[in-house]
């Protein structure tokens, strides 16, 4: 889950990283009030979860509060890379002397976190990474030991940071590392980390990505999830503990287990069909869960057939079958459904379904063929 700039910077500040004074606004009037509080020049920044906002015109320097209001009005009406801007951050503007880069992420190949710094931060860091990777200094961090002072000094020296700033830089690297670890982030990045005209380091931009699998440990962050970014059906699925990804095909899939769901999609394709979604209902498929899942699958207008592929290990097939039947009582649909059940109590499950005149299949291949045929009408 990506965090907005203003949230990332607030977290950074909690870890002792200096950030500019500022607040987030939802209306131009609010933006004006914040600019008045700050006094002097302010910078109005769109809060959307994409990079390159500056280049897209989503960041403007305002001379007066009235101008901050005007820019906020314009920016709040924008879409940046397809995302609507719903909030702006109004920060005290700073006199920038240099723009540095500082970030920490996982280096999968090295199986360690890596901290990276560059003297050429700012909006063109991707180009720097591509054209002159030697300008990005890296150091791997032992996850148990954390970042060491000598490593912070190596980074500072590597980017030719002036000596007076080393102490502050050291604190920032430690703060960033701790923010990264304690929030279960997969990325914590300051770009640019600026050297101000009065020789101070300041995190002007901030970005964090939190590992979705660790979100349960951060309910306060989970609440901040930006729903604009996600399809409604995916949001609904998460509420019910389902993993659902919408795809472009016409065969809805309801499967227990992620691996089996992938296999089901492959088999559908093998027989000339296209899956409409990936859906893992997980273990212990209760009627409630099946109902929720079926509703989500059927909100997709493209779905012309639904394939249930359930392996009953811990989950008992007769309970799943009953779940499917209960769900169908509540969901009004004439989309054809094909069910393949194997495992514990499969026979009992199939009996239940047959009594209710549902189409069942014994093997996955058979089920997939039936689903493909049903979808083709
Ligand atoms: P991004 O384009 O989405 O990465 O947004 P950033 O927050 O990194 O801002 C883009 C650029 O705007 C920065 O690299 C700076 O050059 C400039 N900028 C941001 N804040 C300030 C500020 O307070 N004063 C000045 N002069 N420029 C700023
Ligand atoms: Mn930036």
Image: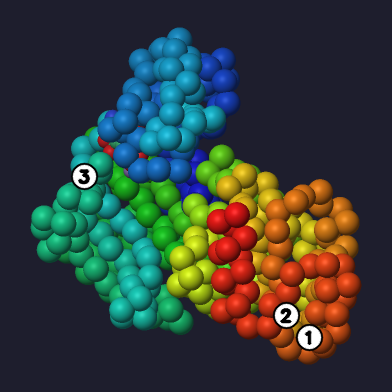
Query: Does residue 257 appear in the picture of this structure?
Result: yes
- Other residues around mark 3 within 10 Å, as few (<14) / some (14–19) / many (≥20): few
Q: Which residue is drawn at the image coordinates 43% and 29% (left, top)?
A: 79
The structure's colour scheme is: rainbow
- Counting residues from the start of the chain, the first of labels 2 and 3 encountered is 3
Q: Which residue is drawn at the image coordinates 12% and 63% (left, top)?
A: 134
Instruction: Answer whether labels 2 and 1 touch (C-beta < 8 Å).
Output: yes
- Counting residues from the start of the chain, the first of labels 2 and 1 encountered is 2
The percent position of residue 264, horizontal first and vertical second, equals: 56, 73
Q: Real-space Cα distance between discs 2 and 1?
A: 6 Å
Which residue carries the number 1 mark? Answer: 346
- Other residues around mark 2 within 10 Å, as few (<14) / some (14–19) / many (≥20): many
| Element class at badge 1 | helix
The percent position of residue 363, horizontal first and vertical second, equals: 63, 83
Quarter of the figure with residue 58: top left
- Other residues around mark 1 within 10 Å, as few (<14) / some (14–19) / many (≥20): many
Quarter of the figure with residue 163: bottom left
| Element class at badge 3 | loop
- The one nearer the camera, 139 or 13, is 139
Q: Which residue is drawn at the image coordinates 83% and 73% (left, top)?
A: 353
Q: Real-space Cα distance between discs 2 and 3?
A: 54 Å
Q: Nearer the viewer, mark 2 or mark 3?
A: 2
For residue 45, the mark is: none
Q: Is residue 152 above or below residue 54?
A: below
For residue 124, the mark is: 3
Which residue carries the number 2 mark? Answer: 341
The percent position of residue 215, horizontal first and vertical second, equals: 61, 63
Q: Real-space Cα distance between discs 1 and 3?
A: 59 Å
| Element class at badge 2 | strand
């Amino acid at each position: 889950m990506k965090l907005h700039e203003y949230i990332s910077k607030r977290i950074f500040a909690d870890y002792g990283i200096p950030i500019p004074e500022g607040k987030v606004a939802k209306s131009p009037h609010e933006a004006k009030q914040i600019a008045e509080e700050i006094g002097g020049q302010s910078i109005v920044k769109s809060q959307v979860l994409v990079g390159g906002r500056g280049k897209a015109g989503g960041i403007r320097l305002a001379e007066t509060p009235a101008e901050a209001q005007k820019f906020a009005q314009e920016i709040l009406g924008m879409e940046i890379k397809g995302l609507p801007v719903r909030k702006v951050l109004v920060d005290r503007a700073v006199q920038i002397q240099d723009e540095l880069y500082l970030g920490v992420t996982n280096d999968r190949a090295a199986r360690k976190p890596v901290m990276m710094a560059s003297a050429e931060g700012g909006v063109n860091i991707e180009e720097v990474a591509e054209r002159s990777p030697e300008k990005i200094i890296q150091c791997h961090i032992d996850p148990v030991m954390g970042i060491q002072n000598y490593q912070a000094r190596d980074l500072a020296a590597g980017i030719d940071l002036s000596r007076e700033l080393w102490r502050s830089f050291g604190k920032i690297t430690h703060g960033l590392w701790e923010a990264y670890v304690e929030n279960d982030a997969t990325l914590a990045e300051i770009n640019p980390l600026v050297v101000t005209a009065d020789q101070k380091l300041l995190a002007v931009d901030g970005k964090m990505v939190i590992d979705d699998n660790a979100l349960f440990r951060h309910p306060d962050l989970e609440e901040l999830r930006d729903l604009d970014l996600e399809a409604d059906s995916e949001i609904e699925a998460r509420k019910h503990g389902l993993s659902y990804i919408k795809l472009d095909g016409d065969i809805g899939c309801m499967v227990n287990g992620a691996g089996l769901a992938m296999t089901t999609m492959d088999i559908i394709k093998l027989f000339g069909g296209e899956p409409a979604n990936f859906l893992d209902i997980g273990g212990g498929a209760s009627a409630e869960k099946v109902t929720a899942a079926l509703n989500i699958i059927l909100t997709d207008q493209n779905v012309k057939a639904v394939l249930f592929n359930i392996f009953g290990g811990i989950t008992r097939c007769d309970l799943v079958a009953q779940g499917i039947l209960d769900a169908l009582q509540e969901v009004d649909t004439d989309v054809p459904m094909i069910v393949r059940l194997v495992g514990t109590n499969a026979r009992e499950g199939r009996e239940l379904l047959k009594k209710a005149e549902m189409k069942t299949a014994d093997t996955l291949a058979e089920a997939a063929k039936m689903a493909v045929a049903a979808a083709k009408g």
